[in-house]
Structures are given as structure tokens and as C-alpha cells.
Image: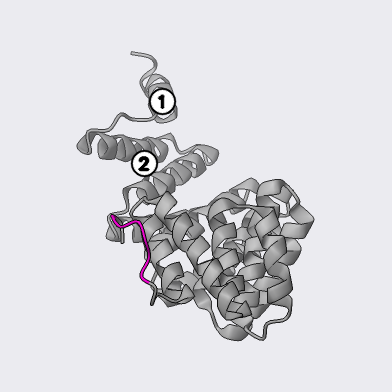
Amino acid sequence: MAKGKEFDEGMDAGVALTLADIALQIEQPERADALISHAIKLAKDSGDNDQLAWALLTKARITNDGNVLTEAEEWVASSEDEWLRSAYNNQCGIHALEAGDIPAAKASFAQSLALKEMLEDKVGQANTLYNLGEISREEGNVEQAKEFHARCVDLLEELGDRKGMVNGLAILGHLEATEDNVDGAVIHYEAALEIAESEEDFEGTVVSRWGLAEMARAMGDQDLELQHLSQVMAGFMQLGRPTPEPIKNRLNELADTIHGGS
């Protein structure tokens, strides 16, 4: 398939879409686009409107083309496939979010979430809750952001997505910190750190320890702050990676303060 110029005539639209996703994973966007166009043609020729809508949604997901979403709307509206409706609303939310239309994004994600809950699509629910949480965070609605992200973390725990949990817990820690709730922030950062270390998630460990260092700083505990930042720097050194400037600068400040500049 990757080397050939023509497609198997026996291929249906569903197979073409599956292969399009595989082509994207192996970084062959031109082949993916050709497969999607092939799927659209097959669906139109066969009169399978649901398959046509899925093909158009796949194209919209790859190209972020609002015109393709508009084209798909008619077929989605006439479909009884709730999975299709959910995917359509989710893609509309993503498109609106990237276009800066926050009200439209919120409305689309909310509709998608309701369908995902009905379908018991936990992966989809977690992704949508994350998006809604980030929108709330951007809007400065901290309490609503905490609610969405906490629900997301609960679902990720059910799914066994421990690295996803690290990110979610770190976000909750940051949200608590923005409200000066140091104790609440520490609880979430420590939970994130515990999982990150058990999963050997270096990035998650760095984020968690940086958060804990910031909380130690807020509490005036310079020794604890130094401990967390030193461990972060040691991790970067072990991997042969340069330590980020903010961490080095803060370590230098702490060393000057603790040792009196000597």
C-alpha cells in the first residue's frame, strides 16, 4: 500500500479510513489524504451516508478544514449513529477552539460529553473533560476547571492511564496553587510525583517536583525547595540533558541565600 499507486478495488470505505490512520502514524500524510479521498468516493458511490460522514470527519480531523465539517453536518444530522454524532461534536469543538470561538467550543464539547457518557466511552469522556477543564482554566474559572480535571483524573484511573493521571494531578496542584491553597497543591503534586516515579515518567517527575519546590518556596522552606530542585537537576544530568535555565537560576539564588553568597 505504501509503495503502490493504485488501491485495491475490493477495499471498502471503512478499510480505507483505517489505513489512512495507519498512514498518518507512519508519517505518510499524502498517502493518508489519498486514502481518505478514496473512502469519500466509495461512500458517495455506494450511498452510505454514515460512512461518508465518517470519511469527511477523518478529513476534517487531519486538515482542520471547517468547510469539510460543514459538508459532514448534513449527513451527521440524518444519522442514528450516536458515535458519529459524538465524534462530530468533538471535532466541531476542536475546530472552534483553534479558531478562538470559545462559546462554540464549550457548546460542542458539552454535547459531545453527554453522548460519550451515554455511550460509556470513558476514553472519550476523559479527553473531553480535559478540553473543558483547559477552557475553564483559560477563562479563569478555577473551581469549574478543578471539577472537570478531577473527573478526568478519576476516569484515567479507571482506565489505568497512570501517565495521564500524572498530568491531571499536576494540573490540579497548579489550580490549587493559584488559589493560594498550598496544602491542597502539595497533596496533588505529591500524588503526581509518586505515580511519575513509579512509571519512570521523567517529564512528570520534573513537573511534580517543580510544583513542590514552588510550594516549599511559598512556605518559606528553602531546604525543601533546594531538595526538590537538586533532584530535578540530577535527573537531567543523568539523562545527559541540559538543566532548564529557570531551575539553574533558582538553584543559584537558593545557594546564595542559604550560604550567604560564599
Identify the residue at the far right of this view.
103
Pick the front one: 179 or 241: 241
Q: Position of residue 187 (x, y in %)?
A: 49, 58
The disc label shown at residue 28, or none: none
- State whether residue 11 appears in this view: yes
Q: Tell me: 255 left or right of 143.
A: left
262 to the left or right of 152: left
Query: Circle 1 sits on which residue?
Result: 245
Total tally of numbered discs in the picture: 2
> Relative to the observer, which residue lies in front, 240 or 30?
30
**Identity of the residue drawn at 37% across and 58% down:** 23
The picture places residue 153, in percent across and down from the top left corner, at: 51, 67
Q: Residues within 10 Å of mark 2 (few under 14, many from 20)?
A: many
Left or right of 243: which side holds 69? right
Image position of 156 with respect to 27: above or below: below
N-terminal of the pair, mark 1 or mark 2, is 2
Occupied quadrant, residue 126: bottom right
Look at mark 2 in the image and give the residue it sits on: 228
Residue 181 on the magenta segment = no
Using the image, determine if residue 63 lies above or below residue 114: above
Q: Quadrant of the C terminus?
A: top left
| Amino acid at dot 1 | Glu
Q: Residue at x 40, y 30 (%)?
A: 247
Residues in magenta, as a range: 3-8
| Front position in the image: 232 or 253 | 232
User: Where on the picture, by quarter, is residue 232?
Assistant: top left
- Residue drawn at x 68%, y 54% is 66
From mark 1 to mark 2, how far is it between C-alphas?
16 Å
Kind of residue at disc 2: His
